[in-house]
Image: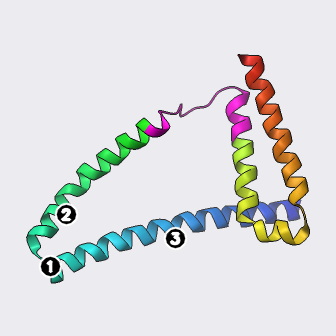
Amino acid sequence: LTLFLGEKLTLVQAVNGEKLAVAIRQISTICFGTFLVFKYGYWQLGVVMLASAPVMAVAMGLLLVVVFGIKNPRPTGEGPQAQKNVGSLVGEVVLGIRTVASYGAERRFYEEYERTCDTQLRQVTRAS
């Protein structure tokens, strides 16, 4: 049990730490770029840049909705759960690829991934 919890804790920390680092990097880049425009560039350009930021954010949100579609916030049925299982398995393997390779567990994860995908395919086929 402690080994299982230790592995999951490391995975959660890795995922959250990576997302947090990306968010901090993006925010600091935007802030520093804005500072540079006001400090060394034309202030009018800085004002235009700040005024266009909300418009670009709305446009990006619409683009994501069009490209990826509107997802149901509360998935129901076995299909979404199977997709979540496949996604978590892939995420776990990708984040811990060095550990997986060092233990030679590639084959085991591949078989588990294949089994989960087959289960999901059968459920979708039955539902159709």
- Amino acid type assigned to the residue bearing label 2 in the image: Met
Q: CA distance from mark 3 to mark 1?
A: 28 Å
Q: Earlier in the sequence, mark 3 or mark 1?
A: 3
Q: Position of residue 44 (x, y in %)?
A: 8, 68
Label 2: few (<14), some (14–19) or many (≥20) C-alpha neighbours in 10 Å: few
Q: CA distance from mark 1 to mark 2?
A: 12 Å
- The residue shown at (72%, 61%) is 94
Q: Quadrant of residue 75?
A: top right
Name the residue that disc number 3 marks. 21
Question: Which label is found at residue 41?
Answer: 1
Label 3: few (<14), some (14–19) or many (≥20) C-alpha neighbours in 10 Å: few
- The residue shown at (25%, 57%) is 53
Query: In which quadrant will I find the N terminus?
Result: bottom right
Range covered by the magenta-colored residues: 67-83
Decide: marks 3, 2 in contact (CB < 8 A)?
no
Question: Which label is found at residue 65?
Answer: none
The answer to whether 79 appears left or right of 2 in the picture is: left
Taking the magenta stretch, the answer to whether it contains residue 59 is: no
Of tags 3 and 1, the one toward the viewer is 1
Q: Position of residue 73 (x, y in %)?
A: 53, 34
Question: Which label is found at residue 49?
Answer: 2
